Structure formats: structure tokens, C-alpha cells
């Protein structure tokens, strides 16, 4: 049974279609509309639809890449298309808002910390540095005293 | 004899005290007039009540008034404070009790009930201020102040004060500040008897009295009472009783002459020990809660919540103070988005002749910043 069906299809296909048809043919554009051999006695007028449609179709440029890609989206159902659009736009605006929020948050925290804690830290550090200096001075003094306990050489009398 | 006494106390009005001569603006940048504030300075001995007459029986010459049109009725951001409370009138280094009854230190005055926390707030100001103080040998102090500012009118101010250093209570006490344009503010304090004090504070400008406050305090052994009359507008009665050594309870009644619906009554309570102090005021105008804690001998933190019922506003504040002999830093952060800090330091040691103060106030919602700098020199 299947073989018979296949034979039928093969017999109806003459194989000559490729001579007159081209790759640009789509179901919307019928081959006889594109390649109509002009018959004698007729002239191209507005009332001659096959000739106009020929002109229309020939001048139409090829689809650009983005148009073809956009055309691919037609294979998805409407809700999938809408859902994807919503997800991407919301994600992008969410990222932008997060960036703005983090900017203002970091500014608020940093400026408040500077105003609240900088004087204290500055003064405490200064006090510590002063203390260290004082203790160093004490050390130096004590050191000098320790070294002075040894015998000092006596100076010779000044010559006159 | 008096000369000897004066020489002995020569070091007392050291320059650090005189820092408070710098006139300060209120920290709340949004409020319209400034309250007459004095720079708060914590007593070196941790004074949990932080104010009142017991710790500073003599008002030293360090108090300063701002020439602005505010009265005791200005009670802070939400209007729920205690009438008459001001910041910072503590003079350090006083050992004598001043002859007041025990009630002066145990409950203290009602208007000072929140001082343990309020004193930790920085008093931010704007602009530059240069002041020079001269002390004469007869208890009079003369001072000159130049202030420059972009938010408040600057200019020259003359300061005159009289404090009787010889008397242990230091009364009578008088301080006056005058500007060439005719604005004068002065405060006078006398002690009619040993347990009572009377104060008059007035501000005069344009030939009329902007404000006229008279305060009468009575101290007893376990309670204090005050009567405050402001401007012929209202009279406030205060009462504070020491229940135990740590707990005090009190009440305030404010009676208005013209707008009787604005009269208010409120109750107050405070629980304080050496480290903590919790105080609360609750009335029909609003609620005030304050908490102060001394983490270290030099570091104190405070938290405040003010709620106003009629104006439907609440403000929470966190503040801290780091205090040493040479410098003091105060910082605070607010739920209104205000962040402020002040640094006061002596230039050149404790007995120095020079002191400076820096203040910064950042308003986050409005994105505004105010910076202030003041220098005070003492020639005594």
C-alpha cells in the first residue's frame, strides 16, 4: 500500500519544475506569477496584474538578517514571546536600579562614617603618636644617662 | 584676701570652659529659629544628671546665648520635650555643693531630666566665629565675638558677664550679649534664699522684647519644684520627686492664656545609676524617651526617641560623646537623615589660651552640608 502511494507521487512529479522555479519561490509567491512569458499583443499596463506583481517581487530586496531572525520568533507562541520580553526588560531595569541603589547606599554610609568617626580616629591616633614620642624621648634620656655613668675623659687645659 | 582667692582660682576659667562662648546653631537644620543653645560639655566627674544646679552652683562665664527669637516654648523637633530644657550648662571642676539642699542633686530639676542624653548631641553651627575673652580682676569678663555665616546674620557681638567667684554659690550671676544693631540677650540669676533660685532670661531687639522668661526654682531635700513664666503666653509648673535614690517621678503642667486648647500636662520619670540613665516624658503633646549609657569613662552613647502626637511626627536619634582632657568629639545620626559631628579641642594643652571647634552637619535628604569653625582666645 505504501509503495503504491509513493509511486503515485513520483509519477505526478515530472522533475521539470526546477527549470522554471527558483529558490525565491515561497508558497506566497507562485512561480507562474514570477515567470510569465510576455505574450504577443499585450503591453505592460496597470491593469496587468501579473506584470506588476513581477515588478513588485523583483524589486523587493532580500530580507536582512535581523528580519529573518525576527521571523523565526513566529514559531514560538505569543505567551512565550511576551514572557521572554518581560523577563529581559525587567532584568535589565532591575540591574540598573540595583546599581543606582548601591551607589546611593555606599555614598550615605561612607559620608556618614567620615563625618561621625573621622575626628575621633584622628584625635585618638594623634594622642597615641604623642604618647609614643614621649616614651621614646624618655627612652633616649634614660639611655643617655646610662651611658654617662662610665668614666668621662678629662679635657686637657686650653693652650694659651 | 580676695586677691589670694582669685589667684587660687586663676586656673578655673581655663580656656576649655570658654569654648562655650561660641554661639551655636541648633543641630536640626530644618527647624526655623535656633534655640538659645550653649555648647554642651560633660562634667569630668560622670554626672548622671548632667546638669542642674548641684553640679554647677556657680554659673561660670561660659554660657552664651544666641540672638535668635526663640523662647522656652521651643521644645525640640516634635514639641514633646520639657519646657525650659536647654543643653549644656555644666561647669567642670566644682567640688563644693554650693549650699543647696540635697534635692538639687538627687532628683534635680525637671527640665534637666533628659540631660544625660541630650548633652551628648553635637551642637552644630555654620560659618566661622572668632572670639576673644578678657577677664578683669573684679569678676567681670568682657568678650568680643566676630561671626561670619551664610545662613544666619553674622557680625560683631559684645559679651559682658559678672560672676562672683568669691562666694561659693557664685551668685548673683549676670551675662549679657549685645550686638551693635540693638539686639541684646541677657540672663540674670540670683538666689533669694539658700534653697531657691530665680532666673530671668530676656532677649530684646528692635525696641521690643522678643522673649522674656522668668524661672523660679525651689529645692527641697527630696523634691524640686519650678515655676516658669514665658512671654506672658504660658506658665509651666514643674515638680520632680525622688522616690528612691535611682528613681524619680515628676509632672509638668503648662497653662496657656490665649489658646486654652494648647495647655498640656505630662508626667516624667527617670531611672539612673552610675552607668545608665533612662528617662521618659509622656503627655498629651507627645512622648520623649531617652537612654544614655557610659560605656567607658570617656565614652558615652545615647539614644533618643521623640514622638509628637499632634504634629504626627517621630524622630529617633543616636549620639555618642568621646571626652578627654584636651578634646571632645560628639556625633549623632538621625532618622530624618541628619548626620552631624563636632570636635572641640584646646590648642596647646589644658591650660592653653586657645581653643577651636569644628562642626559638620550633613543633610542627606536635601543633600546639603554645613561646616563651621570657631576659635576662642582667652586673655585673663
Image: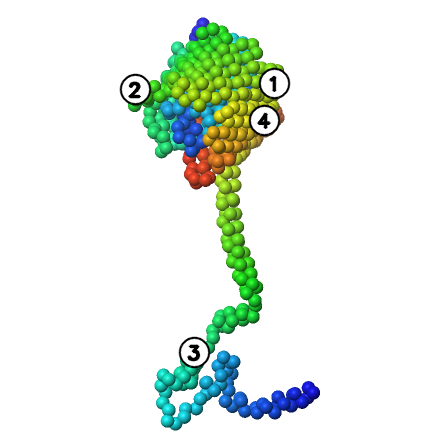
Dot 3 lies on which element?
loop
CB under 8 Å between callouts 2 and 1? no
Dot 4 lies on which element?
strand
Mark whose residue sits in front, 3 or 4 = 3
Q: Quadrant of the C terminus of chain B?
A: top left
Q: Which residue is mark 4?
A: B293
Q: Specify whether residue B307 is in view.
A: yes
Q: Quadrant of the N terminus of chain B?
A: top left
Residue occupying image coordinates x 51% and y 71%: A71
Q: Which residue is mark 1?
A: B246
Distance from label 2 to label 1 (Cα)? 47 Å
Picture coordinates of residue B178, whole percent (x, y): 34, 20
Q: Is residue B317 above or below residue B275?
A: below
Distance from label 3 to label 4 (Cα)? 84 Å
Q: Which subunit holds the residue at mark 3?
A: A
Q: How many marks?
A: 4
Distance from label 1 to label 3 (Cα)? 96 Å
Picture coordinates of residue A110, whole percent (x, y): 51, 41
Q: Which residue is mark 3?
A: A60
Q: Nearer the viewer, residue B161 or B314?
A: B314
Q: Nearer the viewer, residue A19 or B246?
A: A19
Residue occupying image coordinates x 52% and y 11%: B219
Residue occupying image coordinates x 49% and y 85%: A31
Dot 1 lies on which element?
loop
Mark 3 is surrounded, within 10 Å at the Cα level, by few (under 14), some (14 to 19) or many (20 or more) other residues, namely few
Amino acid at each position: 500500500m505504501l509503495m503504491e502511494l509513493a509511486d503515485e507521487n513520483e509519477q505526478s512529479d515530472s522533475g521539470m519544475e526546477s527549470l522554471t522555479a527558483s529558490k525565491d519561490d515561497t508558497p506566497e509567491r507562485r512561480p507562474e506569477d514570477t515567470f510569465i512569458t510576455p505574450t504577443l499583443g499585450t503591453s505592460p499596463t496597470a491593469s496587468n496584474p501579473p506584470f506588476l506583481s513581477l515588478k513588485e517581487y523583483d524589486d523587493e530586496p532580500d530580507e536582512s538578517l535581523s528580519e529573518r531572525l525576527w521571523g523565526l520568533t513566529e514559531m514560538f507562541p505569543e505567551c512565550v514571546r511576551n514572557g521572554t520580553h518581560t523577563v529581559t526588560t525587567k532584568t535589565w531595569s532591575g540591574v540598573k536600579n540595583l546599581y543606582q541603589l548601591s551607589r546611593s547606599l555606599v555614598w550615605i554610609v561612607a559620608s556618614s562614617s567620615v563625618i561621625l568617626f573621622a575626628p575621633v580616629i584622628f584625635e585618638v591616633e594623634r594622642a597615641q603618636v604623642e604618647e609614643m614620642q614621649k616614651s621614646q624621648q624618655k627612652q633616649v634620656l634614660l639611655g643617655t644617662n646610662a651611658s654617662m655613668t662610665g668614666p668621662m675623659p678629662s679635657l686637657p687645659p686650653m693652650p694659651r | 584676701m580676695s586677691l589670694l582667692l582669685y589667684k587660687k582660682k586663676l586656673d578655673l576659667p581655663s580656656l576649655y570652659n570658654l569654648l562655650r562662648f561660641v554661639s551655636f546653631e541648633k543641630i536640626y537644620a530644618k527647624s526655623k529659629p535656633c534655640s538659645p543653645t550653649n555648647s554642651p560639655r560633660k562634667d569630668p566627674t560622670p554626672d548622671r544628671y548632667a546638669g542642674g544646679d548641684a553640679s554647677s552652683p556657680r554659673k561660670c562665664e561660659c554660657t552664651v546665648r544666641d540672638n535668635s527669637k526663640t523662647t522656652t516654648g521651643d521644645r525640640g523637633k516634635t514639641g514633646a520635650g520639657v519646657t525650659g530644657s536647654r543643653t549644656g550648662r555644666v561647669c567642670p571642676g566644682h567640688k563644693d555643693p554650693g549650699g543647696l539642699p540635697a534635692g538639687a542633686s538627687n532628683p534635680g530639676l525637671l527640665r534637666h531630666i533628659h540631660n544625660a542624653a541630650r548633652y551628648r548631641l553635637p551642637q552644630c553651627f555654620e560659618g566661622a566665629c572668632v572670639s576673644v575673652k578678657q577677664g578683669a580682676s573684679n569678676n567681670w569678663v568682657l568678650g568680643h565675638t566676630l561671626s561670619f555665616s551664610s545662613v544666619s546674620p553674622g557680625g560683631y557681638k559684645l559679651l559682658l558677664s559678672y560672676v562672683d567667684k568669691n562666694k561659693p554659690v557664685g551668685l548673683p550671676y549676670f551675662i549679657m550679649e549685645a550686638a551693635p544693631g540693638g539686639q541684646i540677650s541677657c540672663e540674670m540669676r540670683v538666689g533669694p534664699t539658700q534653697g531657691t533660685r530665680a532666673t530671668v532670661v530676656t532677649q530684646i531687639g528692635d525696641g521690643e522684647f522678643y522673649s522674656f522668661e522668668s524661672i523660679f526654682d525651689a529645692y527641697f531635700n527630696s523634691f524640686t519644684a519650678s515655676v516658669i513664666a514665658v512671654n506672658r503666653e504660658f506658665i509651666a509648673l514643674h515638680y520632680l520627686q525622688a522616690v528612691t535614690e535611682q528613681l524619680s517621678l515628676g509632672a509638668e503642667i503648662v497653662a496657656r492664656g490665649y489658646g486654652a486648647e494648647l495647655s498640656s500636662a505630662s508626667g516624667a520619670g527617670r531611672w539612673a545609676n552610675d552607668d545608665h540613665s533612662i528617662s521618659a516624658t509622656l503627655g498629651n503633646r507627645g512622648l520623649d524617651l531617652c537612654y544614655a549609657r557610659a560605656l567607658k569613662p570617656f565614652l558615652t552613647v545615647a539614644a533618643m526617641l521623640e514622638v509628637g502626637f499632634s504634629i504626627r511626627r517621630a524622630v529617633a536619634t543616636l549620639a555618642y560623646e568621646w571626652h578627654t582632657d584636651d578634646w571632645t568629639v560628639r556625633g549623632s545620626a538621625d532618622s530624618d537623615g541628619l548626620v552631624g559631628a563636632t570636635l572641640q579641642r584646646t590648642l596647646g594643652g589644658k591650660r592653653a589660651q586657645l581653643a577651636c571647634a569644628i562642626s559638620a552637619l550633613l543633610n542627606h535628604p536635601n543633600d546639603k552640608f554645613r561646616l563651621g569653625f570657631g576659635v576662642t582666645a582667652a586673655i585673663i
